[in-house]
Image: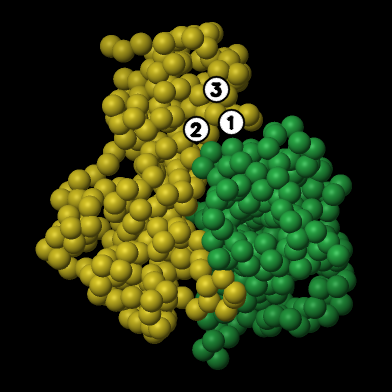
Chain colours: A yellow, B green
């Protein structure tokens, strides 16, 4: 039977602390297959989605919030480990100067494209060469809100399991399926079944509200600076544009995907 | 006649460089009434909006992009100064490890509430106690896209002229009017004229698409973690909620304001 007792760690140089800190870097996350999430709200979302931490880190000497006690119990019950340590060390783990006082280490959970169940939802988000972890996390969060099936990452996107992306996802990292693929891999998978591929583009006059979207709809958003490659746009079933009344003629990538996703959701709600 | 020659700076300890670096801090921005913007795209948006830098910083020895030459000419023509320095020093100014190679210093331009012309637009964005500079900048950028008149900041919001907010605004810091006010000041101003105050809230069942918005519409978004104070919600003409199909029941503040703003814009486009 696994231990039900917390382990105390007092030193910055403790090997477990060093290992946890290393999870801030992508190469270590990849090697270990684990990632780091922080904050009671996000960890509680994880628990509600059925994900328990392999390792839970709490502040020593503090009285735990009832939700944190639930997390501790679930971690022990699932055979995980609970560590208590100083707030200063937790601050080192999260890289924040005002750290929240609970951290969980989870198994990452990328899904192979072949294992995605496209009938799970009528809306899927697809991002290409997304660079900003805050944008990626925000897109996951929006995906959760609109009931999307998940997020498919094309080409060289920022790591969805980075601390910043996990934080911006506000827990949606645990509820959205996440797959990664090259463009040819994605297209081959997409065309083997039902699905309308819709690209957000400035290279069209077709208004995003003039179209009836067909389920499952795959909403494709391009890189923050360059937008979609022209060749990818040509592979889309449809290119649409949101109205832009201003000087700049562009939207943040996470904003564009949300405005599009809500249009698809609204059409389904009212039809 | 002012100088038309660039000044060379080679040392990190140069007083001008120190002054520029200090503009990364709010207290120095307030004292000087200046802020820092970076990158050819944002500086060019500024120029198109009629804003020239007081001081332009370019990389020494590099051939300038034609748009950067336009910026230099406009800076000189407006009596400003142009400095050339190393890429390493520009990196110190912007706080980025991979700095873009042009920086401008601009006069900040907060607008007094009394000087806002509410008839300038049918959509205004209002944010309360917004904490994240990326959210604030993104909201400005969205405001530009939907043709909003500007952004009114209530209570203790993050500084719109911070480097991070300016960057996220992608130039909208130069096209959107920005006012700051307490809630009583804002309400007094609002009620002295036309205007529908609409709050995004979880404390209502009224769907955001079930309402006809009246111009000018003031869209109010609350703090990222807490949402709107209950007393502020009671002052609204209307509370609305976006549908949320997921587990988390919340949206990023910048996403929520964009989805609402596009609904208002779409109603106006189709009516």
- Picture residue at 41% right of the left edge, 11% below the top: A15
Residue A222's spot in the image, x, y percent?
38, 61
Residue B109's spot in the image, x, y percent?
79, 62
How packed mark 2 is, by other alpha carbons closer than 10 Å (few <14, some 14-19, many 20 or more), is many
Give the structural element (helix, strand or loop) at label 1: loop
Residue occupied by mark 2: A38
For marks 3 and 2, give the one nearer the viewer. Answer: 3
- Picture residue at 74% right of the left edge, 81% below the top: B120
Residue occupied by mark 1: A96
Instruction: Say whether mark 2 and mark 3 are on the same chain.
Output: yes
Cβ–Cβ under 8 Å for marks 2 and 1: yes
**Chain ID of residue with mark 2:** A
Query: Of the residues under marks 2 and 1, which one precedes in the sequence?
Result: 2
| Quadrant hosting residue B181 | bottom right
**Chain ID of residue with mark 1:** A
Residue occupied by mark 3: A92
- Picture residue at 68% right of the left edge, 81% below the top: B122
Cβ–Cβ under 8 Å for marks 1 and 3: no
Cβ–Cβ under 8 Å for marks 3 and 2: no
Q: What quarter of the picture does the C terminus of chain A occupy?
A: bottom left
Residue A244's spot in the image, x, y percent?
53, 76
Mark pair 3, 2: CA separation? 12 Å
Of the numbered discs in the image, which one, if any, rests on residue A85? none
How packed mark 3 is, by other alpha carbons closer than 10 Å (few <14, some 14-19, many 20 or more), is some
Judge left or right: residue A84 versus residue A219: right
Mark pair 2, 1: CA separation? 10 Å
Q: Can residue A185 be seen in this view?
A: yes
User: Considering only vertical position in the picture, is A28 above or below B72?
Assistant: above
Mark pair 1, 3: CA separation? 7 Å
| Quadrant hosting residue A269 | bottom left
Give the structural element (helix, strand or loop) at label 2: strand
Give the structural element (helix, strand or loop) at label 3: helix
């Amino acid at each position: 039977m696994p231990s039900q007792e917390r382990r105390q760690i007092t030193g910055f140089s403790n090997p477990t602390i060093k290992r946890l800190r290393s999870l801030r870097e992508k190469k270590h996350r990849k090697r270990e297959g684990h990632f780091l999430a922080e904050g009671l709200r996000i960890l509680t979302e994880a628990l509600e989605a059925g994900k328990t931490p392999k390792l839970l880190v709490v502040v020593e000497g503090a009285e735990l919030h009832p939700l944190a006690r639930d997390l501790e119990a679930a971690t022990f019950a699932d055979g995980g480990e609970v560590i208590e340590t100083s707030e200063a060390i937790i601050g080192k783990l999260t890289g924040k100067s005002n750290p929240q006082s609970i951290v969980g280490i989870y198994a990452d959970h990328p899904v192979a494209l072949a294992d995605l169940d496209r009938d799970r939802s009528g809306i899927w988000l697809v991002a290409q060469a997304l660079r900003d972890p805050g944008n990626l996390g925000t897109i996951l969060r929006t995906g959760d809100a609109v009931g999307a099936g998940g997020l498919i990452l094309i080409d060289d996107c920022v790591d969805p399991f980075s601390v910043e992306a996990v934080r911006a996802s506000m827990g949606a990292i645990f509820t959205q399926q996440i797959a990664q693929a090259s463009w040819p891999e994605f297209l081959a998978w997409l065309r083997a079944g039902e699905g309308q591929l819709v690209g957000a583009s400035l290279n069209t006059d077709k208004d995003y509200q003039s179209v009836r979207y067909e389920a499952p709809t795959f909403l494709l958003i391009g890189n923050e600076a360059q937008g979609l490659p022209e060749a990818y746009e040509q592979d889309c079933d449809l290119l649409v544009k949101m109205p832009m009344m201003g000087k700049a003629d562009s939207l943040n990538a996470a904003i564009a995907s949300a405005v599009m996703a809500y249009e698809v959701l609204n059409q389904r709600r009212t039809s």
